[in-house]
Image (cartoon, rainbow, N blue to C red):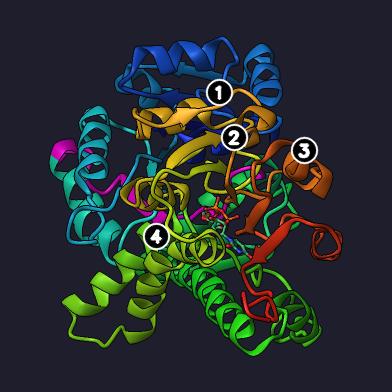
Amino acid sequence: MTQVSIVGTGYVGLCTGVLLAELGHEVTLVDLDPSKVQAVKDGRAPFHEPGLDEALKQQVTSGRLDATTDTQRAVDASALTYLCVGTPQDETGAADLTAIEQAARDVGKALAGLDAEHVVVTKSTVPPGTTRDVVRPAALQAAGDHARGRVSFAMNPEFLREGSALSDARDPDKIVIGAEDPATGRAVEALFEDLEAPIVHVDPSTAETIKYANNAFLATKVGFANEMANVCEAVGADWVDVAEAIGLDDRISERFLRAGLGFGGSCFPKDVAAIAHVAREHGVPSGILDAVLEGNEVQPLRAVELLEAEIGDLAGKRVALLGLSFKPGTDDVRRTRAAPIHDALVDRGAEVVCHDPQASSTFHELRPDATLAETVEDALTGADGCIAQTAWPAYAELGPDRFQAWMVTPVVVDGRRVFDADAMGGSSVTYRAIGLGGQAPDS
Ligand code: UDX
């Protein structure tokens, strides 16, 4: 059993804390925000994540997981400290390291009187070199000479997906440990001895690079799928069939080939931009990454173009926008593709009515002027057109008859291939879908 402190109670900090407590370790979470600390103590995750509240409550009740605003107390009660604070994208695309540098200083200060060994582990997604060049110096400077030599550093990236973060934490496909020396690597590895996953031991900068390469490749795969889906529409093919076939090649696999309106979330857009920025900083070409980002900016607008192709000028038209979260299973709207779609429709003079099973309130914070419908029926009633942006299961259950019954003109643009193309095609609904060819207005 290891006593662990974790700075940051967001997705990564909280899921890591729950996992480590479930593995039998003693965990103290630290956050600057007393309301977040209280929420953790009450067993309430400050965001929607399936299964997290129950798991959190269980670990708090067991006494293995606690939370505090007091960094000193948390560090004193631990032999290893995780840094799990946000590293958002700044206006240049680079990762903003303000929070993690401050967290490193806070932990260093708490280690000043240290007489025992202590490991500081970066888990936040940070540009290659950050643990060595930012975290380590900031912590050691704050810790002072007495503690120097007792504190070592590592980097242990997370690969959690929103909506399945807890299961991803419990059953990872790999554990990457970037330690500055073998003993530190073993100390981090010991945390996960009850997990089955393969352990990858590298240096800290390689671990930081693995994280970016993992996300950038997945985002590139999605960007490729979107671009090929656009080609399928032009040549009369259906990307769903193409993706299924190429996915049978186990070098490709069928995962992350779902074409749609682009990738959103707090990771892909930020991480691709950050590693492209690192490449530029080092004078290394980043053409593929730049193209993935450029494609992701224009892909949402294809839904608006498909709608215009069917109902003409959107000025004065009522358009239902179904799905506001960046993907199903979450209320997270960070970099959601619904935002640029909403803006493009408004810019064209459309009256937009939005709906989402979970993300209405978070989207309203993003777009205070957005009109939000309580139910799908309210959103679709009287609408001249509809765009499905998030593949919520609740939408997949809507048959053509619902669109025919509620809409003035049943024109549906399926941005995420939510609906059954055959059922839609066989009805009086005008159905356009990303990647579905052979539907040009004159075909
Ligand atoms: C991602 C990575 O998967 C995870 O490993 C990392 O730790 C954090 O970033 P997340 O952002 O939660 O996780 O969502 P993910 O399920 O990966 O989807 C990211 C975006 O890509 C979403 O907008 C999703 O709609 C989109 N996507 C995903 C597609 O458009 N097509 C696909 O086939 C898969």
Q: Gap between marks 2 and 1, in whole Å?
A: 21 Å
Q: Amino acid at mark 3?
A: Ala
Asked whether mark 1 and ligand 1 are closer than 8 Å, the reply comes as no
Based on the displayed image, in which of its 4 quarters is residue 231 positioned?
Answer: bottom right
Task: Find residue 269 and name its label.
Answer: 4
Of mark 4 and mark 2, the one earlier in the sequence is 4
- Left/right placement of residue 125 relative to residue 373 reads left
Q: Nearer the viewer, residue 40 or 418?
A: 418
The residue drawn where x is 60% and y is 59% is: 415
**In this rendering, the label closer to the viewer, 3 or 2:** 3
Residue segment shown in magenta: 142-164
User: With respect to residue 218, does 52 lie above or below?
Assistant: above
Residue 186, percent from left and from top: 54, 56
Q: Secondary structure at mark 3?
A: helix
Quadrant field for ligand 1:
bottom right
Q: Which residue is labeled 1 in the image? A: 45
Q: Nearer the viewer, residue 181 or 102?
A: 102
Q: Which residue is labeled 3 in the image? A: 405
Crowd rating for badge 1 (residues with CA inside 10 Å; few <14, some 14–19, many 20+): many
Q: Which residue is labeled 2 in the image? A: 356
